[in-house]
Each structure stands twice: as structure tokens, then as C-alpha cells.
Image (cartoon, rainbow, N blue to C red):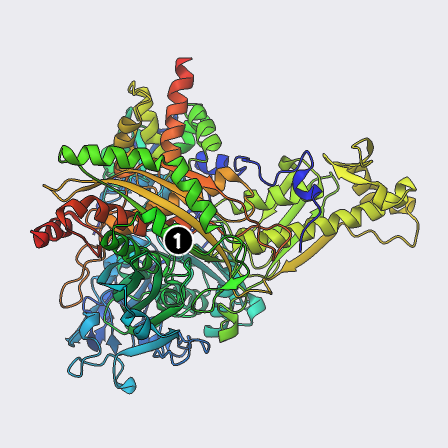
Amino acid sequence: MSRFVDIKLRVNGEDVSATVPSRLNLVDFLRNDLCLTGSHVGCEHGVCGACTVIVDGDSVRGCLMLAAQANRADITTIEGLADNGQSDALQAAFTNRNALQCGFCTPGMLASALGYIDGGGTADRDAIRKHISGNYCRCTGYQSIVDAICDVIEEART
Amino acid sequence: MTGPAHIFDKPNRYIGKSSPRADAARLLQGRGKFVDDVTLPRMVHAAFLRSPFAHATITAIDTAEAKDAPGVIAIYTGHDLTDHVTPYVGVLTHLKGLRSAPQHPLAVDVARWQGEPVVMVIATSRALAEDACELVEVDYEELPAVVDTETALDADTPVIHPEFGNNLAWERDVVAGDIDAAFAASGVQVIDREFRFGRHTGVTLESRGTLCDFDPSENELTVYYSGQAPHMMQVIFATHLDLPEENVRVISNDVGGSFGIKIHTYGDEIATAAAAKLLKRPVKFIADRFESFVTDIHARDHVIKARIGVTNDGDIVGIDLDDLTGVGPFSMYPRTSAIECNQILNLTGAPYNLDNYRAKGRVVFQNKTLMCQYRGVGHPIAMAVADGLLDDAARAIGMDPVAVRHLNLMADDSYPRASATGMKLDDLSHQKALTKLTDIMDYKGLREKQTEDRKNGIYRGIGFVSMVEVTNPSPMFYGVGGASIASQDGATVRLDAGGALHVASSITEQGQGTNAILAQIAAGVFGVALNRVKVTTGDTKTTPYGGGTWASRGAGIGGEAMLQAAQALKDQVLAVAAVMLQTSADKLDIQDGAVTDPDGTLRLPLADLARTVYYRGNELPNDLNPELIATRHYRVTDFPFVFTNGAMAAHVEVDTATGFIKVLHFWAVEDCGRVINPLLVDEQIRGGVVQGIGGALYEECQYSEDGQMLNATMADYMVPMASEMPDITVAHIETPTKTSVLGAKGAGEAGTGGAPAAILNAVNDALSPLNASIWQMPMTPERVLNAIDAAK
């Protein structure tokens, strides 16, 4: 039977306090307890990347981290990236390139792409492909996603 | 039928434009609404205990301890549901002789594949339901499992359904001409190969799921459905849960990929609906990834012995093939599991002039996950067999693969005509497509480079496929065989008081851009700005009745219905405008949200017209009855299917030391008729190609000898990821179909249908200096090395 843990954290700029089962993973906490359903669950074993969120500045698999481990963390989800403007350029580029179809991988893909761009990544297609290889997309074939990330990097430079 | 040119050619027309999808923003901001994002008051959760054996008798089920577990609301076994759900059988009359046994949502007495649901636990959370599953005790007596298709029909193999006497589900023979005589003729070389296509599956990133809500006061079931065919599911839920059809509402909001996976009757989803009805409250079930791998339909799994005969000049004289496929223990309901085999029999060699053809297909039962229609249905196999044999034959007679295709492909001016198997063909462009392909890829340059590379021990190969794709199916696909699957689609277009359009359609969105192209068609044909069209799809209560989006039918059938509805509304609005402006309708047009003169001069904004009609009808003559809404339906009548064609090429490098294959580039020239939105169509082609590459190189559901799936995790089942995939160049030939005004054919499955053949041919081209070849997919490094070793 689950034990419970008290946690305090910051999610998308808001303070959150909760008592969570010790076995609850972070993405289920975000989705079910905070109703932030933008983060998706694809495999629950860290392979597909659909649940990628930003924890204290790092891209993290929400299914491989327990909610209890997020105590005192600062978390940004896809909803937060949209609200604070961090994903604006990527949103525009993904739209123009049609770099999403069903949209299920998209929140995790944006979080990973943002990690690449903020980390000083260049518009090198092979490097981008390598970076997003932890994010599974069944619909697009990836090329448009690479195009979109390149566009953001190149536009920022000009 | 041809349409007035102005639908496509006037300014302010959106058909043919690369407009970005309006609904992208929602998904990019995390505001999508997938099934698992929906929460309802009093909602509870289902978890399933599944058979750990491929084949076993269930001798006892003890749920006593689980019933007392925290949070548990109810527990159901197969027997508990037999009074509430009628069994279903996956057969259709036009697939003559197809047999399957009645299927129950939860196994009754016998479990027939690993993963078959056996017990359903309903609890206040999914975690608690899973906890309780661990407390359920099921006693099984393991039975011998039928795993290998090639021995499934042997006399000493156990029979899965004893009442049938053997494990044969269906067989069909197709004969055209005289293949034996053609092969025996002098100067004919016969090439003989055995092809093996592994099982793979869709791996939709959003796993299957359902949220079912039952309101006993209205006797009404509402199902939030992640899938492609809401009206089909409405009939299924109504029929098997004993509800009036009109009391079942099926809603598809966002669907996280489907590809043919989420268009079938899954026991866990039916059981969830039954639980909602019995408990009179919402029940949610979301498959986890393991459940997806062992219960989502699988596809392919064919062993094909095939021969091609060619003259020394390269003329194909005929193709002969024998297809054996295993489909699991039941034929899937309601679309059946015989369609893939049937497609292979119908389509192999369909691009080519072919007088002699013989094909035998046998579909057998086995104790593995059920097989059914997944993206491309039969096409990847039919194309790989025909074009694999053709390139092999070209090598044997020393002919270039492009030349042998130009020689044998049907001439672009030879339509309408039939294929060797009698499929009606029209509006195809094989020759033009192949010419365009070799132009854009710089074929000559690649060959020169290949020769140079070989001197340096680099093994690169170029592979081609010329293909057809079945799209826009008519009632001859399913309806004719007794399936409650609509082949027509409807569209409604309504002018609202503010001058905007609200449109609804029975086709559905799984990310292809269905809603976007519906808006483009409506806006362009009617005459408003694209951002003034609101689209509703995916709801049996609020959309016209229709088939949904599958078999590459959405744009071609649903799009045409939308075109006709928008044109009808335009005529209706102009009739009102003519009275208001005291002129005749043929002297008016609608452009940019206003009634205009034909030259575009503004006469009356649509909002003024609509507000007059809706608010101030007193200003209109009493005998004028304005109708500002129009509905039209469309079905394909002249053909069983509308075929498309394409030509594709792959450039690969094989590492002969490790067996690894790197796809360097891929080209696709596709003729899907009129292209409604090039941005979206190109992405359909690319995504399809990548799925095809997955099947060709990586994806395989591996089974042990006792029927256990060995790689049912995303870490073990290989899917294409970004770093392995090439850039893909896409180009189009546009030969509109004459079956509609819109002229659009389907584009969704071409890439998946064609890519495996092109990759196979490229790999074998790369291996040809070693006299090695491979005829098994996926072409894993181990299999490539084995092929190289076998040639030594």
C-alpha cells in the first residue's frame, strides 16, 4: 500500500503544495492532480519522450521521476512554456512547417527542442536529429520538425 | 464530371494552397483534448488481468480477495458479461468462405492469445484497480499454442476452434491467363524467391483508450473514443450492448495517431462500455504500452513464395505467388482479418502490363495477437513482391531497373483499363511519375557515384518502386459484405449571423489535417476568408452520417461532400441576395465574405445578408424562404476504389561488416489527384515513408515458440527515430480523378505502401556486387550479415 509524501514545488510559476502517494510519478501528478494535461504519457518507461517537462532548467522525463522527487523543484510544462512566451518562436515554426500531426508527441518535442536551442545548439540537421532522437513521433517522419528547429535557430541569428 | 474552373482558379481560393493548420496552435500549447485528458464526475477506472498464456483453459477465477481491496467498485469475468454483451464474429459475406468464431470482450473459458483480457477490475483509480488485479487468482491449464503459420494447417497441429476442423480462416485463388504456359515459353527466365514479412504494429504514441459514460435516465451511452470511425463504433456499441443506435453517442476529440489501429472492436473497450452501463457511471480505460503491444492489432506476417517470368528483352510475362498469413485466433470484427491477404492478391503487379497472373492466399488462425488493417493494408507486401522480383529479374538479364519499369508500366494514355486481376484503373501516371522521379534524384549522377564508391569498398544501393494505392473506397469495400460501415460521407455548411461558416463533416481528424482541408474547401468554394470557417468533426450527435477517415478516403470522399455542400449553400445565399439586391443570382458572386458583382465589386456583406434573414425577416418578401444551411453527401459510384500511383526511390548504404543499413535519402513522386494542401500532403507522404522504413528495417513483434511476445516494450520494439531517418524529397503529378469535381484521391498510405519495396531493392542493389540478396523484412543487421554469409 502506498505511503504518502508532502511536497511543495513551483509549477508554471505558481506555488503548489500537495500530499502525494510515494509511488506517483511526476507526469501523473501534473496531469491528474494539477489538471495540466498537456504533458502526455506514451510509454511510462522513459523511451518515447512524450512526457518531457522542464525541471529546474533541465529536460526531464515526467514518467521516470516521482512526484515526491519534485519537492522544491521548479517545473515548467507545455502550458507554462506557452503562457510565458518561451515556446512562441517554436510554435510559429512548427505551425509553418506543419511539424506536428496528431500532436501527441508535440509537448515533449517542444521541450526537447527548447533544450537544444537554449543550450546553444546550431542549425546542424544531424545534430538536431540526434538531440530529438529521444522523442518518438509516429506521424511526421521528423523532417519537418528538424526544419522547424532550424528555422528558429536561423531566425534568432538574423 | 468536371467542375467549373472558378472553384480552383479564382483568387481567394484555398484549394491547392499550403495553408498551415488552424488547430496546430491548440496542440502546440498543450490544449489538446485526448481521451485521457477528459475527466467526468464520478468517473472510475478499469484495469484488466490478461492471459499470460498464448492458449489456455481458464479453470477457475477467484476474485474474493480483490473485491475487498481498497477502492474496488466491481470485478467482472468473461461469464459475468455474457448476459450483457452479445458476442461478435468478424466475417463478411463478400469474403466468401471466411470463418471466425464468436468473440467475447473478456475470455470465456479459454484464452487464445497472450494479452487477451480475462478479468476487469473497476476501482476509484487506475493504480488501485491494478493493485486489485494482483489479488485476483486465475487458474489456467495451458494448451499447446499454434504459433508458426507454416505448420498451422498441418494435420498434427492443434486446432484453435475445434468446430472448424482445422486452422484455416480463409483462402482465395486468383487466376488470369495461363501462367504455366507463359513461364514454359522459350526465351523466358523465371525468377523464384521466398519473401518473409515480419509482424509489426502501429505503435500509436497515444495508446488506445476509452471513456464511457452511461446515463440510465436517458438510457444513453456516451463514448469518448480515440479512433477513426465514430458512426461505425456507434452501431457496434448499440448492437452488442443492446441499446438503440440513436442512444449511443461517440465523440472523437483529438486522436494521438491511429493508422488503422483504432478502428476495430477491442474487448477491453467493449467491456469498459459494459461496465459503465452496469455501474451507471463513467468508466475510463487507457491501455498502457504493454497492453498496446499485445492487444493492438498487428499487421503483415506473410510468407510469400513468388515467381516472375521475363523475356530476355525485359518484358514481364507473368507473376505467380502463394501467400500464407497468420491472423491470430479470430478474424477481427467488423472489418475482418482477410483484407490484407485479399489486397495482396488483388494488387501485386497492378502497375504493370501483365497477361498472366496466378495468386493463392491462405489465412490461418494462430495463438498470437489479432491481425487486421494497419496503414497500407497489403500494399507494402504486394509492392515489395512485384518490384522486388522485377529488380531481381532485371539484374538477371542485365537491364537497368528504370528501363525495365518504363518498358512494363502501363502507358499513361491507356486508361481507363483493368489490371490483370480485373481492378478498374483510371487517371494514373506511372510513366510520368517515374520520369519525374529519376529527374529529381539525379539518377545518372547517383549511379556514377555508386560505381566510384564500390571501388572503395562502400556498398551503396539505389532501389525503386512503382506503386498503386487503393483510395476512396466505394461500398464495394465493406458495405457490400454486410458491414455496418458507411462508404459515403456528409458535409453541412451553415452561414451564421456574423457572416462566418460553421461546417461539420463525418470524416475525422487524427492529425492528417482533415479539419484544415475541410475549411479550405468550404472557404474557397463558398467565398469567405479561411479564418471565418469553424469545423466540427468526430461526433455522431452533431455531424452528418458517414464513414470517417480510413483507407485514404477522407479528402477524396469527405472533401467532395464539403465541396458540394459549400456550392449548394452558395447557390442558396445568392438566391436570397438576388432578391435583396433586385438582380439575378447569375450576376452575383461571393468573394471574401461578401456578395459581389462577378468582378468582385462589393454589393452586400454576408453578415448583413445573414442578419437580415435571421433577425429582420420582415424586410424580406413573404414568399422567400431563405435556407442558410446546406448538406450534401457523396459516395464513389463508378469504381470500387479510386487508385493513385506513385514512384519512389531509396538510396542506402550497407555496412557489410556490421549489417547496418543507413538510408541516405528517399524520393517520392506521388499522384494523388488534386492536391488540396501541399504542405499537409507532403507530410502525409513523409510520415508514411518513415512508417514504411520502420517495417522494412526495424519493426517486428517477436514471439517465442510458445506464443509469448518477447519485445513488448518501446525499448525493445524498434521504431524509426529522428537520427536514423533520412530527408525525404516529395514531388507530385496531379491527375485529378474524374469521379468527383474536387478530383482528390487519397495520399495517406502511399509512403507506407511503397517505401519497403524501394528499401528492399536498394539494399539488394547494394549487396549485388557480393552476389548476396535479402528477402526478409525487417532487414535487421543480423539478417543482412546472414545474407552476405550465404553468398560466400
Pointer 1 indicates a residue of which chain? Answer: B
SS at badge 1: helix
Q: Closer to the camera, A130 or B348?
A: B348
**Image height of B21 relative to B431, above or below:** above
Relative image position of residue B154 (x, y in whole percent): 18, 80
Q: Closer to the camera, B54 or B216?
A: B54
State whether residue B712 appears in this view. Answer: yes
- Residue shown at 84% from the left, 45% from the top: B586
- Residue shown at 52% from the left, 73% from the top: B480
Q: Is residue B38 left or right of residue B677?
A: left
Q: Is residue B538 left or right of residue B348?
A: right
Disc 1: CA contacts within 10 A as few (<14), some (14-19) or many (>=20):
some
The amino acid at mark 1 is Leu
State whether residue B146 appears in this view. Answer: no
Relative image position of residue B607 (x, y in whole percent): 77, 37
Number of numbered discs on residues: 1
Relative image position of residue B37 (x, y in whole percent): 42, 46
Q: Is residue B4 left or right of residue B439?
A: right
Q: Which residue is mark 1?
A: B407
**Image height of B347 relative to B497, above or below:** below
Q: Residue furthest top?
A: A158
Q: Closer to the camera, B280 or B296?
A: B296
Question: Within the image, what quadrant is residue B766 found in?
Answer: top left
